[in-house]
């Protein structure tokens, strides 16, 4: 008989690396079927489509990619009608995807370390980054758009997922101009007489950075657009909005273009985190008046933020909830993401920032120390005060680990609810979907894809958002796995 000490029980991991690795295999096939393997019942009131995006390929014809963020965008679509669900997935037909599939080899440099075979000589002076359209997918103004932050959106047929080409919004954007991957929708925009408004941005890098803000009406037209120059290099993945402001965290990083130009390192491998420099917070008015000083610059501690949860205004303060890392997980040419040592990295933790716009001070407060990433809230509360958030989380309370659980946080009472798919399940971004006609903020469902290593396939789980700890209402078994994804959205249209 062998007894484990209390200590070794605590140290025991909730996952194995081999299980986790299974979710980073390519899915080359494109499917189209009714999901018939279901545990529990799909709520009849859940009607609409969940779109998801993420890297579908982690290799090109067995040549491994260096980083999952370099993988070609693949859209998955799950449509709920009358208690049934239909699945479809399709790769975004980007120029790069089509060319590489035809050639059967890597033809482009990826942003995060994938290089053309042949060493630096094959990569030197190639500044062409591959638009992989792999980060988010939104349905807005009757258009389905696959987004990647460093280039143009791709427009897809919302039914067949066929790629229709780049989207330039009636010429408001020009070729090469980016449309970022984290748009925010304000459900009722005062400026537009209470109509919904989609706000997005683009980053144009250089010695100083140009941030352009776009506001789109429900018809999908750009109705407001303004550009701002910010000193220094920016790696800005996400932002937040309030009724009056767009807010960006300029993480303390520097960029050395030389190894990139010489073909030695990818662009993303030339970004260096600066632990001794503060994070700059850029507060940009959404409706700038002429003659007004455009940007307010505030400062807070060094750290790296990919994702924000939400922001809202309370008198002269703006409150922002964000997932912060102590360091940017730097991408190294010699490293292999498949061998990630989770414990060696700092976990994402949820902080609340209080920006005083009058005196320019910032204070912050830790809300959740458990490793977490990929937040979601009720869509009606974007830019406004809110009570509940849903987020992917580690199974264990402390330390850095893959996301295996879904966590709900009640920001008012501090109550937490957790549903875990450990030991063999790995979760992606949860999406909150309100129940039609609901009034309570957490009356609805949380939808998430879970990679099940035991069967090497993915499930779509549906949970009751009012009580995650009750477990799943329904678990839809797909016929295959879906590689770990990035973001998605739900549309009831
Ligand atoms: O100046 C340039 C500005 C810019 C837009 C620098 C640059 C070349 C680095 C750049 C491009 C940035 C790009 C293409 C970023 C793409 C990011 C991406 C595809 C994904 C980011 C994901 C973030 C997180 C936090 C993912 C978490 C994943 C898990 C928890 C595991 O499933
Ligand atoms: Fe993101």
Image (spheres, rainbow, N blue to C red):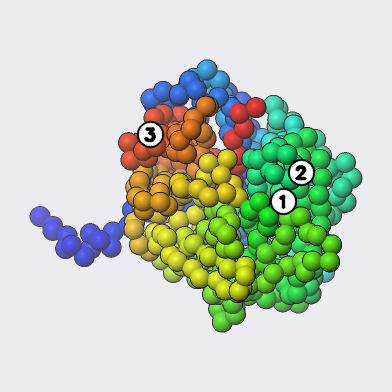
Count of numbered marks: 3
- In the displayed structure, would residue 316 be above or below residue 176? below
Distance Cα–Cα, label 1 vs label 3: 34 Å
For label 1, the SS is strand
* Label 2 Cα crowd, 10 Å radius (few <14 / some 14-19 / many 20+): many
For label 3, the SS is strand
Distance Cα–Cα, label 1 vs label 2: 8 Å
Q: Is residue 285 left or right of residue 426?
A: right
Residue assigned mark 1: 200
Instruction: Say which mark, if any, is on residue 73.
Output: none
Residue assigned mark 3: 472
- In the displayed structure, would residue 33 be above or below residue 489? above
Indicate which disc, 2 or 3, sits on the residue closer to the N terminus: 2
Between 200 and 41, the one lying in front of the other is 200
Between 154 and 358, the one lying in front of the other is 358
* Label 1 Cα crowd, 10 Å radius (few <14 / some 14-19 / many 20+): many
For label 2, the SS is strand
Residue assigned mark 2: 216
Q: Which residue is at 45% across, 24% downward?
A: 42
Residue farthest to the bottom, as pictured: 276
Q: Are marks 1 and 2 in contact (CB under 8 Å)?
A: yes
């Amino acid at each position: 008989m062998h007894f484990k000490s209390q200590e070794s029980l605590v140290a025991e991991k909730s996952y194995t690396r081999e299980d986790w690795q299974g979710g980073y295999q390519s899915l080359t096939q494109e499917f189209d079927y009714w999901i018939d393997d279901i545990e529990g019942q799909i709520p009849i009131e859940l009607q609409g489509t969940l779109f998801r995006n993420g890297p579908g390929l982690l290799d090109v014809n067995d040549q491994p990619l260096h980083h999952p963020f370099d993988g070609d965008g693949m859209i998955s679509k799950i449509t709920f009608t009358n208690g049934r669900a239909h699945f479809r997935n399709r790769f975004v037909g980007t120029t790069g995807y089509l060319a590489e599939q035809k050639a059967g080899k890597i033809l482009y440099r990826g942003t995060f370390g994938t290089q053309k075979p042949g060493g630096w000589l094959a990569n030197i002076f190639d500044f062409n980054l591959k638009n992989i359209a792999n980060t988010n997918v939104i349905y807005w103004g009757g258009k389905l758009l696959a987004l990647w932050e460093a280039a143009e959106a791709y427009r897809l047929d919302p039914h067949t997922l066929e790629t229709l080409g780049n989207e330039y919004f009636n010429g408001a954007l020009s070729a090469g101009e980016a449309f970022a991957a984290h748009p925010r929708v304000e459900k009722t925009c005062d400026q537009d007489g209470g109509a919904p408004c989609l706000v997005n941005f683009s980053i144009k890098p250089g010695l100083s950075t140009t941030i352009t803000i776009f506001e789109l009406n429900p018809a999908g037209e750009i109705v407001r657009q303004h550009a701002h120059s910010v000193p220094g290099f920016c790696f800005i993945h996400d932002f937040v909005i309030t009724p009056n402001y767009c807010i960006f965290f300029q993480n303390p990083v520097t960029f050395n273009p030389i190894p990139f130009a010489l073909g030695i390192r990818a662009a993303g491998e030339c970004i260096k985190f600066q632990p001794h420099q503060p994070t700059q917070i850029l507060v940009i008015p959404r409706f700038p008046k002429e003659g007004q000083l455009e940007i307010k610059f505030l400062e807070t501690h060094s750290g790296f933020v990919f994702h924000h949860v939400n922001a809202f205004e309370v008198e002269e303060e703006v409150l922002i909830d964000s997932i912060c890392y102590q360091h940017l997980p730097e991408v190294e040419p010699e490293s292999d993401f498949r061998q990630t040592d989770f414990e060696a990295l700092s976990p994402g933790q949820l902080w609340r920032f209080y920006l005083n716009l009058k005196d320019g001070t910032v204070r912050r407060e830790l809300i959740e120390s458990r490793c977490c990433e990929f937040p979601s809230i009720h869509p009606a509360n974007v830019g406004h005060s809110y009570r509940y958030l849903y987020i992917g989380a580690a199974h264990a309370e402390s330390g850095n680990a893959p996301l295996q659980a879904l966590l709900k946080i009640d920001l008012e009472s501090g109550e937490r609810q957790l549903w875990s798919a450990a030991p063999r399940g790995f979760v992606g971004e949860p999406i909150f979907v309100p129940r039609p006609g609901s009034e309570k903020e957490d009356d609805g469902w949380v939808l998430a894809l879970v990679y099940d290593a035991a069967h090497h396939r993915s499930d779509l789980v549906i949970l009751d958002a009012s009580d995650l700890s009750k477990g799943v209402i329904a678990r839809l078994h797909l016929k295959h796995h879906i590689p770990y994804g990035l973001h998605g959205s739900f549309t009831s249209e």
